[in-house]
Image: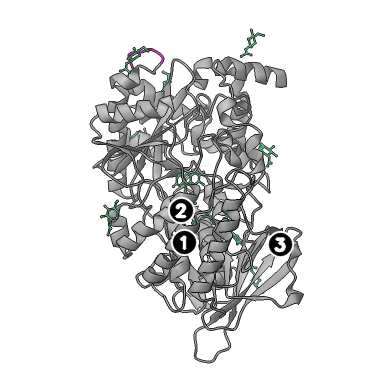
């Protein structure tokens, strides 16, 4: 493996910094990204080989590729397209539009777990960070301890991410009301603006900047070495290729098979160096799915799909969890300004309280169903359970124009469970990598998750009754809990049958209105599928580094820690480093070098199109939405 000496490397970085700074701060419109090529441009004939092939250019994959490319030749294969120049991705105001786009090229691939909850997987460079709600908060210290990570090193690794893609929000009125309501309801102390996970109420970071422009893990690729880093888009890896003919030795991953955007088959291979590896960072659905399709998993399941067994491991696809979310809809006097998560209440009871507002009142809202962010009050729960399928949901969404105006004016308070303790599994439906596997999360199967939910709803109720919050609501004095629960049940958009006791029994409310906040994880657990160094147990040349390895969701929201894992483990994956503990010196080396350089984050062209600040908010949102719809029909 070609190792560049640290000194030489440092000189190059210093030189690059010099070039950058001499060209001025706001001179560039774009980040210095490596070129993002379509997969069809890749030619196997050139016989290029790589020290690392990373599958999945997501939240973990991008920082991993950037870090590893400092020293090694890296090929990053992402099944989706580029986030740059796509307004659905780049602007906070379009958060819900991106999620509602169910076309085959959408950056968001919808799936429905067997629990009846509508969910989404990222399908774009940057992964979850290109479609998510942007909230940034570090892991709690007990998470770091349980993971067996070096806490000091972890603390030193987060800033590399924070300098590049994280901003402080200019908090919106709805988020300020939640902050004050939380404090008034006793979720204290107030910890101010902080990335740290502390009991009480705080404002966290966000990957949206002050103009509402999204910064993503893809931006981190600009910190990579463009001469060593090859990025292919629309490259769907459908199989890891193993050398199984080594006699007694373990099967060794040597390459991958992938499809380009035209469906053409391609192959890429590792160098013959001992340290070269395939790293799977395809996310909590994608990584177990790819291991299964490559012959690593429960024998019965592989046999069922005629996949030849490379390694039997009953744990692949097991331990899938999703943090249950229940949201309370609150009608307000005026349509609140759009906001995604900025404030969080970290309660002692294992529940996190967050909020969102204003995603039901743009003219486009009327056309799509927007998951948890919509105020889609009304007809869904009147559809008999057996007929409650996607088509009926869509039909219902079509009829939204007949809804009363108030339903387009309101916000949500979200209650979600730490952990969770309930787990489920993932199994293949077929051998097509583009298909969603069947996923079950078993929300609230563990009684502790259910009791935490009840505690969370009670906390939300206390917040609603505070002076700060009741000031916002339509009738000024706040709403009786039962009425709010009733509205929230009808606003809910999962496929779970509703019950008449939903607004009288908090347990039933929790079960029937559960949705996702998309923090699903598991499927390739440490100690079961990968070892403590994230190497796939029983084979060589293969690791998994992403959300699929997690036992629980870190902190209040996972992206900070998943990006940090990518950057730090990029250093740790060094054959001379090997463990997260040992990556210490090496990682710190990177960290300081980056600190010296700290390239300015640059704006991409599309930022100019519509700065969020200049957007006029549609105050009479309900009537506007109806006018809009009438024009359409
Ligand atoms: C809508 C939404 C909102 C969220 N809000 C927040 C939030 O506010 N704060 C927060 O902290 N977290 C949030 N999250 C969660 C967070 O974004 C995810 O937990 C995190 O991004 C997961 O990272 P990952 O690296 O495990 O997977 P991903 O980031 O999903 O990366 C996996 C990548 O692999 C690619 N891939 C998959 N299979 C293949 C294949 N076979 N070949 C090639 N490429 C493949 C995918 O296209 C994807 O780019 C949200 C998530 C979603 C979806
Ligand atoms: C944005 O989303 C809309 C609605 O789903 C879709 O019609 C449009 O093609 C998307 N734009 C891009 C650039 O993907
Ligand atoms: C890491 O940072 C957290 C939060 O700032 C702090 O509580 C903890 O003590 C730090 N750990 C170490 C080992 O420095
Ligand atoms: C597996 O192979 C058998 C025998 O060739 C065939 O009958 C069966 O349909 C195949 N199953 C799948 C899922 O392809
Ligand atoms: C409620 O609103 C009124 C009028 O806008 C304002 O004067 C008052 O300070 C608010 N009260 C709280 C607790 O926010
Ligand atoms: C909500 O209220 C309506 C009208 O009062 C009632 O018919 C319905 O049963 C209630 N639903 C729940 C879940 O309480
Ligand atoms: C709510 O009602 C349903 C059906 O009527 C019943 O099965 C369920 O046990 C009730 N839930 C609670 C928590 O009482
Ligand atoms: C909706 O239409 C009515 C009647 O044409 C009009 O008076 C009103 O201003 C419109 N509302 C908006 C927000 O455009």
Question: How many neighbours does mark 1 have within 10 angstroms: few (below 14), some (14-19), or many (20 or more)?
Answer: many
Magenta: main secondary structure? loop
The spot of residue 349 in percent (x, y) is: 25, 42
Residue 343 falls inside the magenta stretch: no
Q: Is residue 511 visible?
A: yes
Give the residue number, with chain letter if any, for mark 3. Answer: 39
Report the image quarter containing ligand 5.
Answer: top left
The answer for how far apart the CA atoms under marks 1 and 2 are is: 8 Å
The magenta span reads 474-478
* Position above or below: 199 against 622: below
Give the residue number, with chain letter if any, for mark 1. Answer: 567
> The C terminus is located in which quarter?
top right
Furthest toward the bottom, the residue is 247
The spot of residue 554 in percent (x, y) is: 37, 52
* Position above or below: 104 against 483: below
Question: How many neighbours does mark 2 have within 10 angstroms: few (below 14), some (14-19), or many (20 or more)?
Answer: some
> The N terminus is located in which quarter?
bottom right
Question: How many neighbours does mark 3 have within 10 angstroms: few (below 14), some (14-19), or many (20 or more)?
Answer: many
Give the residue number, with chain letter if any, for mark 2. Answer: 161
* Element class at badge 1: helix
Asked whether mark 2 lies closer than 8 Å to ligand 1, one says no
Q: Which is more foreground, mark 3 or mark 2?
A: 2
- Residue 50 horizontal side relative to residue 334, left or right: right
Q: Are marks 1 and 2 in contact (CB under 8 Å)?
A: yes
Furthest toward the front, the residue is 22
Which comes sooner in the sequence, label 3 or label 1?
3
- Residue 374 horizontal side relative to residue 38, left or right: left
Residue at 41% in and 75% down: 578
* Position above or below: 351 against 521: above
Seen from the viewer's position, the closer of residues 39 and 71 is 71
* Element class at badge 2: helix
The answer for how far apart the CA atoms under marks 3 and 1 are is: 24 Å
């Amino acid at each position: 493996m070609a190792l560049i000496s640290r000194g030489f490397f440092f000189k190059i970085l210093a030189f690059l910094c010099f070039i950058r700074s001499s060209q001025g701060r706001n001179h560039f419109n774009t980040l210095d990204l490596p070129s993002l090529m379509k997969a069809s441009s890749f030619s196997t004939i050139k016989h290029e080989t790589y020290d690392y092939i990373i599958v999945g250019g997501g939240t973990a994959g991008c920082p991993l590729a950037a870090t590893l490319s400092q020293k090694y030749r890296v090929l990053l294969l992402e099944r989706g397209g580029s986030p740059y120049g796509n307004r659905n991705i780049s602007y906070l105001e379009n958060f819900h539009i991106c999620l509602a786009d169910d076309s085959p090229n959408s950056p968001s691939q919808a799936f429905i777990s067997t629990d009846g909850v509508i969910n989404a997987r990222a399908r774009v460079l940057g992964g979850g960070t290109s479609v998510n709600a942007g909230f940034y908060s570090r892991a709690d210290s007990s998470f770091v301890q349980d993971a067996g990570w070096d806490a000091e090193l972890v603390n030193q690794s987060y800033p590399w991410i924070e300098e590049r893609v994280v901003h402080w929000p200019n908090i919106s009125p709805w988020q300020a009301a939640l902050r004050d309501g939380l404090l008034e309801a006793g979720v204290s102390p107030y910890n101010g603006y902080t990335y740290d996970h502390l009991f009480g109420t705080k404002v966290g970071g966000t990957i949206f900047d002050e103009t509402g422009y999204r910064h993503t893990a893809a931006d981190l690729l600009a910190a990579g070495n463009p001469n060593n880093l090859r990025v292919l888009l629309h490259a769907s890896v459908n199989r890891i290729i193993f050398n199984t003919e080594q006699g007694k030795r373990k099967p060794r991953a040597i390459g991958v098979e992938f499809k380009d955007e035209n469906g053409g088959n391609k192959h890429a291979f590792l160098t013959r160096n001992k340290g070269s590896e395939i790293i799977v960072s395809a996310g909590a659905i994608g990584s177990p799915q790819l291991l299964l399709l490559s012959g690593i998993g429960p024998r019965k399941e592989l046999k069922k799909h005629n996949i030849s067994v490379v390694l039997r491991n009953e744990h692949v696809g097991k331990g899938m969890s999703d943090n249950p979310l229940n949201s309370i809809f609150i009608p307000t006097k005026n349509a609140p300004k759009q906001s995604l998560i900025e404030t969080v209440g970290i309660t002692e009871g294992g529940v996190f309280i967050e909020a969102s507002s204003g995603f039901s009142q743009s003219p486009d809202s009327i056309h799509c169903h927007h998951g948890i962010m919509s105020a889609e009050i009304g007809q869904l729960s009147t559809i008999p359970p057996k007929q409650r399928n996607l088509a009926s949901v869509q039909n219902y969404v079509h009829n939204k124009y007949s809804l009363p105006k108030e339903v387009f004016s309101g916000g949500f308070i979200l209650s979600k469970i730490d952990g969770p303790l309930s787990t489920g599994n993932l199994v293949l439906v077929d051998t097509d990598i583009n298909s969603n596997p069947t996923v079950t999360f078993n929300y609230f199967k563990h009684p502790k998750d259910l009791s935490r939910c009840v505690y969370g709803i009670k906390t939300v109720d206390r917040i609603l009754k505070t002076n700060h919050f009741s000031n916002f609501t339509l009738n000024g004095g706040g709403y009786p809990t039962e009425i709010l629960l009733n509205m929230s049940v009808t606003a809910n958009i999962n496929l779970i049958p509703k019950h008449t006791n939903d607004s009288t029994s908090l347990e039933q409310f929790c079960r029937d209105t559960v949705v996702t906040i998309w923090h699903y994880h598991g499927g390739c657990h440490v100690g079961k599928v990968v070892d403590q160094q994230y190497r796939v147990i029983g084979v060589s040349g293969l690791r998994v580094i992403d959300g699929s390895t997690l036992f629980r969701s870190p902190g209040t929201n996972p992206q900070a820690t998943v990006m940090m894992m990518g950057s730090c483990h990029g250093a740790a994956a060094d054959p001379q480093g090997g463990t997260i503990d040992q990556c210490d010196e090496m990682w710190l080396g990177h960290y300081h070098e980056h600190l010296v350089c700290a390239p300015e984050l640059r704006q991409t062209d599309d930022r100019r199109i519509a700065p969020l600040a200049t957007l006029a908010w549609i105050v009479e949102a309900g009537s506007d939405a109806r006018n809009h719809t009438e024009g359409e029909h």
